[in-house]
Image: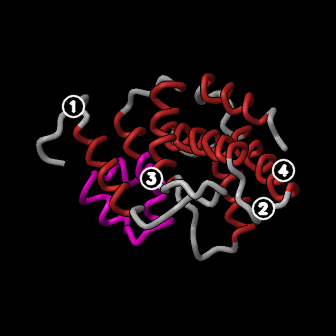
């Protein structure tokens, strides 16, 4: 973190490069099989352009939000590269991999309300972007029922975070109306 000052965009460029490297071999689940890095970039884009978020910690955490969950990245690595605060926000948005997926989904709903504002904004952008991806290119093996269940679960998570960012919440509600 040495040599970086607030607002110099160095943190964001470093986070984007780090995330791109960590996700370099991954693809999204959708039929289009887009490079995975598009997802964290979409979150940062939604936060900046749709949510009016200018906090570099939040934006960096959005770029890094899936690195611990989906790559070989450790929390210690994030702390060393990006500092304690960014690592904490990423950890707040990371699901516990050792827990059954149904429990992980329930935990996201119950923990959403008490998460930090930064983590709530990242989570809001994540749910918004995930629904957009589902509408644009649903995974080939996902039934209509599974898509609907995901939409409804995402709404339960977002409903716990109402009052965090009105612009992102309105965008989420807009895409939710396209529920299959």
- Residue highlighted by disc 4: 148
Position of residue 27 in the picture relative to residue 131 (left or right): left
Q: Nearer the viewer, mark 2 or mark 1?
A: 2
Q: How much space separates mark 2 and mark 1, taking CA atoms?
A: 42 Å
Q: Earlier in the sequence, mark 3 or mark 1?
A: 1
Q: Nearer the viewer, mark 3 or mark 1?
A: 3
Where is residue 108, by image quadrant? bottom right
User: What residue is at 74 percent from the left and 30 percent from the top?
Assistant: 173
Determine whether the residue tagged by mark 3 lies in a helix, strand or loop. Answer: loop
Q: Are the residues at dot 3 and dot 1 in contact (C-beta closer than 8 Å)?
A: no
Determine whether the residue tagged by mark 1 lies in a helix, strand or loop. Answer: loop
The magenta-colored residue range is 62-91
User: What residue is at 49 percent from the left and 56 percent from the top?
Assistant: 36
Determine whether the residue tagged by mark 2 lies in a helix, strand or loop. Answer: loop
Task: Please name whichever residue, 128 or 114, is drawn nearer the observer in this view of the structure.
Answer: 128
Estimate the x, y position of residue 136 in percent, counting from the top left.
68, 43
| Residue 70 drawn in magenta | yes
As drawn, the residue found furthest toward the left would be 3
Q: Earlier in the sequence, mark 4 or mark 2?
A: 2
| Dot label at residue 8 | 1
Q: Nearer the viewer, mark 4 or mark 1?
A: 4
Q: Categorize mark 3 by other alpha carbons within 10 Å: few (<14), some (14-19), many (20+).
A: many
Q: How much space separates mark 4 and mark 2, taking CA atoms?
A: 10 Å
- Residue highlighted by disc 2: 142
Q: Categorize mark 2 by other alpha carbons within 10 Å: few (<14), some (14-19), many (20+).
A: few
Estimate the x, y position of residue 105 in percent, counting from the top left.
71, 60
Q: Earlier in the sequence, mark 2 or mark 3?
A: 3
């Amino acid at each position: 973190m040495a040599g970086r000052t607030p607002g110099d965009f160095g943190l964001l460029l470093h986070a984007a490069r780090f995330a791109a490297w960590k996700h370099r071999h991954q693809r999204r689940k959708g039929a289009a099989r887009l490079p995975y890095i598009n997802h964290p970039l979409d979150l940062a884009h939604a936060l900046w352009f749709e949510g009016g978020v200018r906090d570099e910690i939040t934006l960096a955490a959005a770029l890094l939000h899936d690195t611990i969950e989906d790559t070989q990245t450790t929390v210690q690595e994030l702390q060393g590269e990006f500092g304690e605060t960014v690592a904490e926000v990423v950890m707040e948005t990371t699901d516990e991999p050792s827990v059954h997926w149904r429990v992980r989904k329930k935990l996201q709903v119950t923990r959403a309300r008490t998460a930090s504002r930064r983590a709530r904004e990242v989570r809001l952008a994540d749910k918004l972007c995930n629904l957009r991806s589902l509408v644009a290119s649903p995974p080939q093996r996902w039934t209509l029922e599974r898509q609907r269940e995901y939409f409804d679960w995402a709404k339960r998570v977002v409903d716990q975070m109402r009052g965090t960012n009105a612009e992102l919440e309105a965008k989420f509600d807009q895409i939710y109306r396209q529920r299959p």
